[in-house]
Image (cartoon, helix red, strand yellow):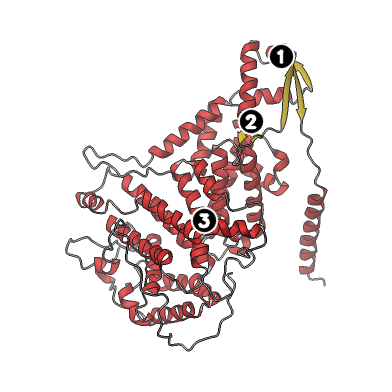
């Protein structure tokens, strides 16, 4: 839970001063502000609102009707934001909003921002935050959303981020909300790219909307906002100064205990993770890892406070390293996060993100199986993670060692299941014939991945033979592998190349579990000695005994 900022409680009625000075004028290059979702129902262009899952009539929803429980929710949330009472904001955001959504708005939108404005003194920034929740609820509960609705959500994010970047925001929000804001921003961009790429069954009205709202969710706009948050917050410099003991950003979980605001700094921090995710979706893994470089993954950080942020960071970091052949880095991070989930997932069972945690957990096991099949590193894997991995993918990993048609099918299946939903950022050409191209980026990444696998098809055999010998002549090994010496030399060079990668600092590192060199046509094998971790063994046994003692304590003796 987010830490509560000690504040003096105010009376129920909010004080008259706004959360922020009036917003700065919008940048002329930005998309102009369009109608809010509430006014969309009264527009003259005849665009229908999204149909609820329940199939009820659209006019059953009155955007201007505000139930008493929503009035109370808005009044209290506004007051707590005014008071900078982070603990209470977190309770209302994580608990109250979800409970009201389940009870009153399971299949319909929340009341419009205009309808709730009287209960928050019409505060501009609060209404931007309310609309952000409004659209997030719409994306989660209502389907399908039109290009018009998606464009309106984009405009709201533009307004909200512009206030944060150019205004003086005098509030503190929970890290969970700020992370969800960045996460949802990237998700809606991804969702719009997928929606825009499915042209085959679109109606004439839907195609017209795509033309009308062609500036919404532009890839340059999305990247520019995230990069602007990173730069304006100066988060990279803050993290650098923290190493010298001059800042306490991580120690305070990003909160400002001196009466300031945490919004810009924490949004800038999470925007680095958002940039990593977007560049992974675009297939630019090098740039993605470069964006994340200021965050030290070897230490606890603000990214570990929110489990969704923690898992998303490691998932995309590990996937990017996998695609860049940095198998050791990917394996280490997957092992750490999977062990963390094993230990702590039971504490998140009531969390709205629990299903997503389980899904990402399964995907990362699949990616770990790929890493270990391409580059065995069993000494890096914890015993508990290894046990889970064998239960899930032992058969497939056995197949992937053979490099035949069944092996390629297994690689294809695991990659397709575990990879991100790649996107094509360019807008479509809306001419006949209309086709779906939403799978094009995925097929390209799959093709490149399987091409890499095919290049390594003989490396498994080389590894098996070399692990049996400390020294062997090239002639003898060529006979064993039934090939000529020239081909074997080529495969040995391929092994050297594929088992080395360039890290983020430009250094060439080996990811093999053993090395070799050739001297006068004799291959000399140098196998790395695994370090015995006695501490891990004792910790595992202590945990087992504690579990046994806990079970014995529950036993009722006659």
Q: Are marks 1 and 2 in contact (CB under 8 Å)?
A: no
N-terminal of the pair, mark 1 or mark 2, is 1
In the rendered image, residue 402, in percent from the top left (x then y), is placed at 61, 27
Can residue 141 be seen from the camera position used here?
Answer: yes
Q: Which residue is mark 1?
A: 474
In the rendered image, residue 505, in percent from the top left (x then y), is placed at 61, 41
- The answer to which quarter of the image holds residue 107 is bottom left
- The answer to which quarter of the image holds residue 27 is bottom left
Q: Which residue is mark 3?
A: 356
Task: Using a 10 Å C-alpha cutoff, classify the residue at mark 3 as few (fewer than 14 neighbours), some (14 to 19) or many (20 or more).
Answer: few
Q: Secondary structure at mark 2?
A: loop
Q: Secondary structure at mark 1?
A: helix
Question: Where 157 falls versus 506 (above or below)?
Answer: below
Label 1 – label 3 distance at C-alpha: 51 Å
Query: Toward the viewer: 531 or 20?
Result: 20
Residue drawn at 45 percent across, 54 percent down: 227
Quadrant in which the C terminus appears: bottom right
Q: Which residue is mark 2?
A: 499
N-terminal of the pair, mark 1 or mark 3, is 3
Q: Are marks 1 and 3 in contact (CB under 8 Å)?
A: no
Of circles 1 and 3, which is in front?
1
Residue drawn at 51 percent across, 77 percent down: 84
Of circles 3 and 2, which is in front?
2
Quadrant in which the N terminus appears: bottom right
In the rendered image, residue 272, in percent from the top left (x then y), is placed at 51, 54
Can residue 179 be seen from the camera position used here?
Answer: no
In the rendered image, residue 34, in percent from the top left (x then y), is placed at 26, 63
Residue drawn at 56 percent across, 57 percent down: 237
Residue drawn at 51 percent across, 41 percent down: 285
Marker disc for residue 194 = none
Residue 271 as seen in the image, left or right of residue 458: left
């Amino acid at each position: 839970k987010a830490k509560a900022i000690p504040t003096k409680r105010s009376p129920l009625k909010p004080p008259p001063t706004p959360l922020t000075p009036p917003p700065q004028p919008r940048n002329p290059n930005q998309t102009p502000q369009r109608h809010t979702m509430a006014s969309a129902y009264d527009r003259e262009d005849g665009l229908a609102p999204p149909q609820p899952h329940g199939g009820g009539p659209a006019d059953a929803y009155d955007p201007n009707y505000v139930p008493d429980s929503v009035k109370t929710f808005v009044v209290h949330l506004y007051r707590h934001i005014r008071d900078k009472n982070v603990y209470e904001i977190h309770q209302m955001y994580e608990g109250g909003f979800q409970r009201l959504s389940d009870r009153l708005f399971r299949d319909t939108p929340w009341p419009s921002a205009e309808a709730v404005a009287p209960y928050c003194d019409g505060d501009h920034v609060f209404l931007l935050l309310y609309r952000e929740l409004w659209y997030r609820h719409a994306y989660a509960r209502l389907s399908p959303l039109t290009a018009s609705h998606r464009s309106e959500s984009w405009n709201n994010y533009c307004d909200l981020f512009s206030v944060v970047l150019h205004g003086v925001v005098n509030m503190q929000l929970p890290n969970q909300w700020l992370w969800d804001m960045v996460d949802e921003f990237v998700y809606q961009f991804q969702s719009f790219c997928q929606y825009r790429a499915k042209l085959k069954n679109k109606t004439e009205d839907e195609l017209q909307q795509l033309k009308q709202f062609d500036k919404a969710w532009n890839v340059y706009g999305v990247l520019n906002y995230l990069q602007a948050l990173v730069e304006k917050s100066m988060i990279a410099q803050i993290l650098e100064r923290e190493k010298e003991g001059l800042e306490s950003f991580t120690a305070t979980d990003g909160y400002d205990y001196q009466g300031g605001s945490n919004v810009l700094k924490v949004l800038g921090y999470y925007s680095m993770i958002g940039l990593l995710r977007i560049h992974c979706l675009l297939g630019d893994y090098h740039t993605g890892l470069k964006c994340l470089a200021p965050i030290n993954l070897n230490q606890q950080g603000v990214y570990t406070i929110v489990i969704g942020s923690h898992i998303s960071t490691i998932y995309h970091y590990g996937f990017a390293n996998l695609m860049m052949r940095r198998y050791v880095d990917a394996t280490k991070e997957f092992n750490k996060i999977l062990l963390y989930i094993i230990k702590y997932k039971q504490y998140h069972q009531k969390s709205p993100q629990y299903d997503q945690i389980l899904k990402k957990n399964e995907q990362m096991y699949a990616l770990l199986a790929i890493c270990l099949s391409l580059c065995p590193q069993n000494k890096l894997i914890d015993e508990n993670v290894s046990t889970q991995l064998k239960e899930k993918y032992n058969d497939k990993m056995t197949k992937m060692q053979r490099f035949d048609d069944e092996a390629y099918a297994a690689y294809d299946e695991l990659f397709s299941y575990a990879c991100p939903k790649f996107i094509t950022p360019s807008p479509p050409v809306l001419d006949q014939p209309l086709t779906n191209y939403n799978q094009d980026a995925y097929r390209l990444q799959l093709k490149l991945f399987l091409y890499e696998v095919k290049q390594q098809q003989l490396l498994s055999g080389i590894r098996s033979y070399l692990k049996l010998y400390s020294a062997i002549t090239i002639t003898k090994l060529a006979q064993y592998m039934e090939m000529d010496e020239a081909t074997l030399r080529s495969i040995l060079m391929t092994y050297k190349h594929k088992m080395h990668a360039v890290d983020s600092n430009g250094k060439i590192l080996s990811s093999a579990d053993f090395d070799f060199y050739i001297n006068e046509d004799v291959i000399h094998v140098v196998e790395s000695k695994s370090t015995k971790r006695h501490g891990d063994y004792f910790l595992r046994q202590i945990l087992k005994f504690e579990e046994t003692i806990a079970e014995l304590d529950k036993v009722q003796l006659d």
